[in-house]
Image: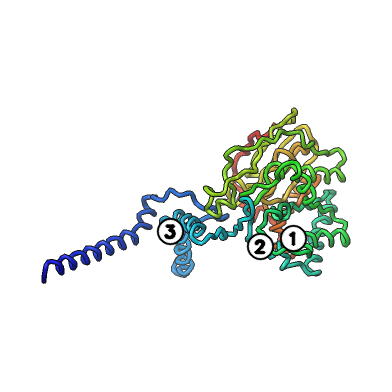
């Protein structure tokens, strides 16, 4: 064997050894991260809890245990956070694709939610049948009638999605349709077939957006000003039943732009917070003296599921200057109302879900119950299932009831 052949063989052997070492290192990297926590990338928002290590319930439940172990490792795989961000980043760079993770990029850096077949709803590819509309009418009338028998008023509130208020920022390629949306179908049907008070917040948001932006450009939610516009329209509607309740004027607050506001949930889901910056955030600063509104939790009176994040706990506001009480069933659009709606009621109890807790209503004896369901959730809910849950409502059996002390903190003046 000559010198050149020996050198070539040695070089080939070295490359093979390096490949083997590299392969072994890559195989073990996830394990190293699992124990040493080497991945410091920010986690993408997935709107769910990561799976926990399952409890072994005996050999008869071995299959369920192994399935739980698999789910745990799928959610805690080493360098998972970094890999998700790299995938999103390089997909955009190499393939000019900014879609995925239930996010669609519109014009001028506006992001839109696409989960739950939302694009089919935008293009009117799916609509409600006459029976669907009748099922919604029966649910709302059943709720109204149940409250009416107890001397309690009822208001059903529908906030619009961002694409309904800002269609001009949707991609140009998205097909438009003149057919009514599911929300428009329901509003027309309820107007002609029922006397339940249904409040569509779409006109209020369209009016408010002529003053300043009402939605966050990187988030699924309205900004504080949009929430304030929705609050004002809701209180105006409540004035039909309680004439003494009147909303604050638009100029009750100085709406100061937030500089360097964190990117919203759509940018986080997309793992592109470095690319899509939030520009439409505002902070309300009162321009007049307002009564203090206290915000708090009561885990005895208003228990919650053990693993529910604090943001979603049942909570309440107190305002001793007022007399009436309200119970509000809602979703993630309503926390922006806490300091505003509480100005008009002695107590407002907020329950973050759509199915009713009748025992709570009967115990608390509110003057009014407000239902709030945002458009993107309304179009995918089953009113028959909601009514079944209403009638089977047992708050204390669904939630834990720890013997905890009341916690109250002041949030607004």
Residue that badge 2 annotates: 173
Give the percent coordinates (x, y) of residue 10. Answer: 18, 65
Which label belongs to residue 391? 1
How are the residues colored? rainbow
Task: Find the residue positioned furthest to the top.
Answer: 289
The first of marks 3 and 2 along the sequence is 3
Q: Distance between the residues labelled 3 and 1?
A: 42 Å
Q: Residues within 10 Å of mark 3 (few under 14, many from 20)?
A: some
The first of marks 3 and 1 along the sequence is 3
Q: Distance between the residues labelled 1 and 2?
A: 45 Å
Mark 1 residue element: helix
Q: Residue 183: in sight, yes or no?
A: yes
Give the percent coordinates (x, y) of residue 56. Answer: 45, 62
Task: Find the residue positioned furthest to the bottom.
Answer: 1
In the image, residue 350 sits, relative to residue 23, either above or below, namely: above
Mark 3 residue element: loop
Task: Decide which of 92, 28 is in the foreground and name it.
Answer: 92
Point out the frontmost of discs 3 and 1: 3
In the image, residue 125 sits, relative to residue 208, either above or below, namely: below
Which label belongs to residue 23? none
Mark 2 residue element: loop
Does the CB distance between marks 3 and 2 fall below 8 Å?
A: no
Apparent side of residue 89 relative to residue 220 in the rendered image (left or right): left
Point out the frontmost of discs 3 and 2: 2
Give the percent coordinates (x, y) of residue 356. Answer: 72, 55
Point out the frontmost of discs 1 and 2: 2
Q: How crowded is mark 2: few (under 14 residues within 10 Å), some or many (20 or more)?
A: few
In the image, residue 354 sits, relative to residue 210, either above or below, namely: below
């Amino acid at each position: 064997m000559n010198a050149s052949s020996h050198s070539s063989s040695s070089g080939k052997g070295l490359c093979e050894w390096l490949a083997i070492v590299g392969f072994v290192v890559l195989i073990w990297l996830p394990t190293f991260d699992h124990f040493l926590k080497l991945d410091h990338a920010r986690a993408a928002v997935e709107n769910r809890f990561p799976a926990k290590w399952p409890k072994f319930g005996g050999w008869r439940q071995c299959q369920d245990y192994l399935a739980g172990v698999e789910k745990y490792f799928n959610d805690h795989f080493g360098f998972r956070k970094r890999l998700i961000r790299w995938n999103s980043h390089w997909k955009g760079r190499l393939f000019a694709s900014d879609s995925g993770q239930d996010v669609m990029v519109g014009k001028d850096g506006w992001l839109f939610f696409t989960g739950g077949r939302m694009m089919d709803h935008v293009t009117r590819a799916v609509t409600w049948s006459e029976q669907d509309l009748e099922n919604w009418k029966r649910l709302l009338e059943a709720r109204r009638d149940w409250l009416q028998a107890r001397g309690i008023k009822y208001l059903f509130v529908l906030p619009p999605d961002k694409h309904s208020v800002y269609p001009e920022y949707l991609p140009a390629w998205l097909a438009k349709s003149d057919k009514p949306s599911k929300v428009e179908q329901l509003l027309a049907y309820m107007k002609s077939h029922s006397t339940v008070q249904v409040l569509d917040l779409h006109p209020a948001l369209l009016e408010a957006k002529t003053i300043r932006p009402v939605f966050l450009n990187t988030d699924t939610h309205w900004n504080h000003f949009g929430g304030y516009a929705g609050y004002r329209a809701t209180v105006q509607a409540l004035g039909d039943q309680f004439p003494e309740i009147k909303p604050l004027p638009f100029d009750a607050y100085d709406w100061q732009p937030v500089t360097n506001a964190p990117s919203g949930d759509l940018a986080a889901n997309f793992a592109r917070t470095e690319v899509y910056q939030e520009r439409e955030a505002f902070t309300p600063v009162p321009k007049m003296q307002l009564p203090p509104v206290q915000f708090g939790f009561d885990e005895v009176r208003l228990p919650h599921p053990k693993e529910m994040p604090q943001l979603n706990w049942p909570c309440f506001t107190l305002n001793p200057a007022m007399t009436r009480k309200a119970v509000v069933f809602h979703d993630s659009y309503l926390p922006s109302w806490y300091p505003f709606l509480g100005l008009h009621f002695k107590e407002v109890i907020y329950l973050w879900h759509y199915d009713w807790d009748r025992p709570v209503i009967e115990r608390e004896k509110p003057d009014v119950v407000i239902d709030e369901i945002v458009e993107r959730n309304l179009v995918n809910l089953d009113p028959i299932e909601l009514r079944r849950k209403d009638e089977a409502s047992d708050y204390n059996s669904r939630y834990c009831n720890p013997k905890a002390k009341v916690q109250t903190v002041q949030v607004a003046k």
